[in-house]
């Protein structure tokens, strides 16, 4: 019986290893996608903040104050 289980374990080892490798590949791929999505979301939030600041008459942190530039 022990020999049988040992043989089954030996036969399933390559399959298990392939499953682990597939899981690692999937994790890396999803991690990359999530990172990119996070960057895009940060950009979107920054743009929304700039738009709100413009609507409220305040210059955003990234844009120079146009009134000060034109009076120089």
Image (tube, rainbow, N blue to C red):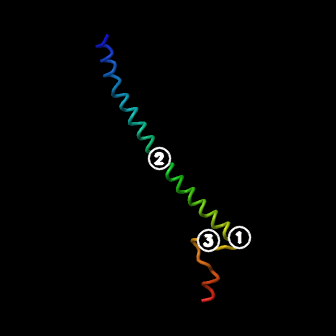
Q: Residue at x 46, y 49 (%)?
A: 32
Marks 2 and 1 sit apart, C-alpha to C-alpha, by: 37 Å
Q: Which residue is mark 1?
A: 56
Q: Looking at the image, is mark 2 or mark 3 earlier in the sequence?
A: 2
Q: Are marks 3 and 1 in contact (CB under 8 Å)?
A: no
Q: Residue at x 33, y 16 (%)?
A: 5
> Quick check: 20 above or below 11?
below
**Which numbered circle lies on residue 60?**
3
Q: Quadrant of residue 54?
A: bottom right
**Which is more foreground, mark 2 or mark 1?**
1
Q: Residue at x 45, y 40 (%)?
A: 26
Marks 3 and 1 sit apart, C-alpha to C-alpha, by: 10 Å
**Total marks placed:** 3
Of all residues, the one furthest to the top in this rendering is 1
Q: Secondary structure at mark 1?
A: loop
**Which is more foreground, mark 2 or mark 3?**
3
> Quick check: 66 above or below 7?
below
Q: Where is residue 52 drawn, in percent x and y? A: 68, 66
Q: Looking at the image, is mark 2 or mark 1 earlier in the sequence?
A: 2
Which quadrant, please, contains the C terminus? bottom right
Q: Where is residue 40 drawn, in percent x and y? A: 55, 57
Which quadrant, please, contains the N terminus? top left
Q: Residue at x 54, y 52 (%)?
A: 37
Of all residues, the one furthest to the bottom in this rendering is 72
**Which numbered circle lies on residue 31?**
2
Viewed as shown, does residue 40 lie left or right of 57? left
């Amino acid at each position: 019986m022990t020999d049988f289980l040992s043989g089954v374990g030996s036969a399933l080892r390559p399959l298990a290893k392939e499953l682990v490798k597939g899981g690692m590949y999937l994790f890396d791929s999803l991690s990359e996608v999530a990172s990119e999505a996070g960057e895009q979301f940060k950009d979107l939030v920054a743009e929304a903040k700039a738009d709100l600041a413009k609507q409220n008459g305040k210059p955003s942190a990234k844009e120079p104050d146009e009134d000060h530039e034109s009076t120089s």
